[in-house]
């Protein structure tokens, strides 16, 4: 390992992107060479079932600056980026999507902004080119996330971002299993900024995020970065108890004033109140269960992913 360490590491998660890989590698290589500094490109094959791995492997065997980390199955975009972070040797680490929605040509802008002394440079998609449903979903996710986490960023979903080495190494030492990299990074970083970047339509193939995956992501984001839902349940529980006491007072007063006949029809009020409380209790229980389950997951300290093979410096090495 006598070669120079790379200055920039470019981390790209890949999940069934065979139609995009060739153009991606060409454009990334061109943009990275234009930096005029040593670089490495780390692609992570997140359990693709198509020809992605073969294409990446061929390219990596030809170009020693390209590294491939091959997962044994699909672990999700953030796990893939984490694997890239673990392997990255550069001073500046840039993450990028494989579908060419983040133009690789913007890497230069991110790197030069980093050089002004920032720890993290995020990006805001100008004229975002995604289906309407996806845009609305992201709007909601951005709003909820920034109010819940207190980390103010305008575009969390955009993975075209640059990180300084020490931030990435801190991220790697946070052994939480479900994490959302942009939010976590911004919690650790000293100086954070954002630059506007262009956004393209997905070149080929379709989004790997379904509605369910987005809902899951939002839920993860809220529960892994804040205790707000637990507090909210407490507040809901407390308010309903107060209301129930007021209602009870009214019922008693009615009974005393209008006699027992009035109170019999009050049974239905009672029913509705009981069911309402049952709802609140079940909600609270579910929420507690969610956090407890999360603790259980974290204490097991399972690895985030399993690597099957690594190709680097133009050679394939089996993991372990
Ligand atoms: N991706 C991944 N694992 C997954 C889902 C996505 O590695 O389980 C990668 C995907 O190949 C792409 C990036 O993450 O490089 C972003 O995915 P996508 O473009 O589908 O997301 P969207 O643009 O719809 O947010
Ligand atoms: Mg995309």
Image: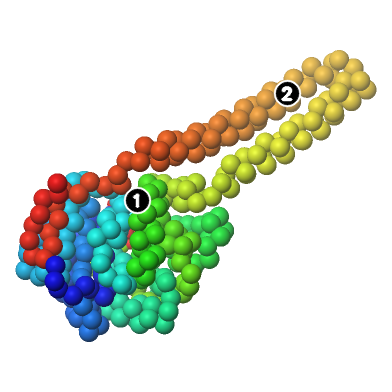
- CA gap, disc 1 and disc 2: 42 Å
Q: Is residue 255 above or below residue 193?
A: above
Name which residue lies at 89% across and 25% down: 253
Judged from the image, the secondary structure of the residue bearing numbered disc 1 is loop
Camera-nearest residue between 155 and 225: 225
Ligand 1 lies under 8 Å from the Cβ of mark 2: no
Residue 156 in view:
yes
Q: Earlier in the sequence, mark 1 or mark 2?
A: 1
Camera-nearest residue between 140 and 167: 167
Name which residue lies at 40% across and 38% down: 299
Judged from the image, the secondary structure of the residue bearing numbered disc 2 is helix
Q: Is residue 304 above or below residue 124?
A: above
Residue 281, image quadrant = top right
Apparent side of residue 80 relative to residue 3 in the rendered image (left or right): right
Name which residue lies at 31% across and 52% down: 79
| Residue 270: image tag | 2
Q: Is residue 223 above or below residue 43?
A: above
Q: Position of residue 4 (x, y in %)?
A: 18, 75
- Judging by the rendered image, the residue that carries numbered circle 1 is 210
Apparent side of residue 13 relative to residue 233 in the rendered image (left or right): left
Camera-nearest residue between 286 and 118: 118
Q: Position of residue 141 (x, y in %)?
A: 48, 57
Residue at the far front in the pictured view: 2
Task: Tell me the quadrant of the picture where the N terminus can be found.
Answer: bottom left
Apparent side of residue 315 relative to residue 67 in the rendered image (left or right): left
């Amino acid at each position: 390992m006598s070669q120079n360490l790379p200055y920039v590491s470019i981390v790209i998660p890949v999940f069934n992107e065979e139609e995009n890989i060739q153009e991606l590698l060409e454009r990334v290589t061109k943009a990275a060479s234009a930096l005029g500094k040593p670089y490495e490109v780390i692609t992570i094959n997140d359990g693709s079932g198509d020809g992605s791995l073969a294409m990446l492997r061929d390219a990596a065997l030809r170009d020693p600056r390209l590294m491939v980390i091959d997962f044994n199955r699909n672990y999700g975009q953030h796990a893939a980026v984490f694997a890239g972070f673990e392997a990255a040797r550069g001073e500046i680490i840039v993450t990028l999507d494989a579908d060419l929605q983040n133009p690789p040509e913007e890497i230069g802008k991110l790197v030069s902004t980093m050089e002004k002394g920032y720890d993290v440079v995020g990006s805001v998609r100008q004229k975002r080119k995604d289906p309407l449903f996806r845009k609305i979903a992201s709007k909601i996710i951005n709003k909820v996330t920034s109010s819940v986490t207190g980390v103010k960023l305008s575009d969390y979903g955009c993975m075209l971002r640059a990180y300084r080495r020490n931030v990435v190494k801190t991220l790697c030492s946070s052994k939480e299993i479900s994490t959302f990299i942009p939010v976590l990074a911004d919690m650790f970083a000293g100086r954070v900024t954002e630059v506007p970047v262009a956004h393209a339509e997905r070149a080929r193939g379709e989004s790997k995020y379904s509605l369910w995956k987005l809902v899951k992501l939002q839920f993860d984001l809220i529960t892994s970065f804040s205790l707000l839902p637990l507090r909210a349940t407490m507040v809901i529980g407390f308010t309903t108890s107060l209301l129930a006491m007021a209602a009870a007072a009214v019922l008693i007063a009615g009974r005393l004033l209008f006699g027992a006949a009035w109170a019999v029809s009050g049974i239905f009020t009672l029913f509705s109140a009981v069911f309402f409380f049952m709802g609140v209790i079940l909600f609270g229980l579910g929420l507690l269960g969610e956090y407890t389950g999360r603790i259980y997951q974290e204490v097991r300290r399972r690895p985030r992913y399993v690597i099957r093979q690594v190709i680097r410096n133009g050679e394939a090495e089996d993991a372990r």
